[in-house]
Image: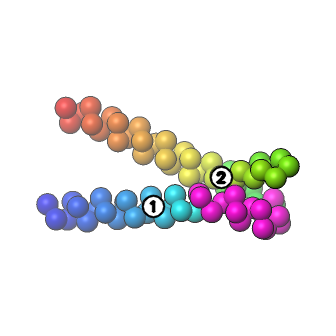
Amino acid sequence: MLKEYHEVTLIGLILVILGFFLILLPFLYKFLPSMERIPSIIWWSYRKDNFYFATSPILVLISIVSLIFFIFSRYIRG
């Protein structure tokens, strides 16, 4: 049972680190305008006036898939 908690803890830490990078994306984009050359599947950004929004579509897809997996696993276990 302890091994199961270890795996869940590792997944949680990975998701926290990915979330941290998602929070940092707009700040990086604001200070590093040369990042516009990165492919849009890895880095998507929106800039208007003094508003910056940046995210990674890959991380958004991973989050959606993990959320769907979590929801369905709750219903399967009953």
Type of secondary structure dominating the magenta stretch: helix
Identified at 30% across, 59% down, the residue is: 8
Identified at 70% across, 63% down, the residue is: 27
| Horizontal side of residue 55 vs 36, given as left or right | left
Closest to the observer, 54 or 64: 54
Which residue is the extreme one toward the front? 50
Q: Quadrant of residue 29 in the image?
A: bottom right
Q: Quadrant of residue 23 in the image?
A: bottom right
Residue 76, percent from left and from top: 24, 33
The answer to whether residue 34 is seen in the rendering is: yes
Closest to the observer, 68 or 17: 17
Q: Which mark is residue 26?
A: none
Which residue is the extreme one toward the right? 49
Amino acid found under the numbered disc labelled 2: Thr
Part of the protein shown in magenta: 22-36
Q: Quadrant of residue 71 in the image?
A: top left
Count of numbered circles on the image: 2
In the picture of the structure, the residue carrying the numbered disc 2 is 55
Amino acid found under the numbered disc labelled 1: Val
Q: What crowding class fits label 1: few (fewer than 14 Cα within 10 Å), some (14-19), or many (20 or more)?
A: few
Is residue 38 positioned above or below 66 on the image?
Answer: below
Q: Is residue 31 magenta?
A: yes
Marks 2,1: beta carbons within 8 A: no
Residue 19, percent from left and from top: 52, 58
Q: Which corner quadrant holds the N terminus?
A: bottom left
Name the element at disc 1: helix
| Horizontal side of residue 35 vs 74, given as left or right | right
Identified at 20% across, 36% down, the residue is: 77
In the picture of the structure, the residue carrying the numbered disc 1 is 16
Q: Is residue 47 magenta?
A: no
Name the element at disc 2: strand
The answer to whether residue 44 is seen in the rendering is: no
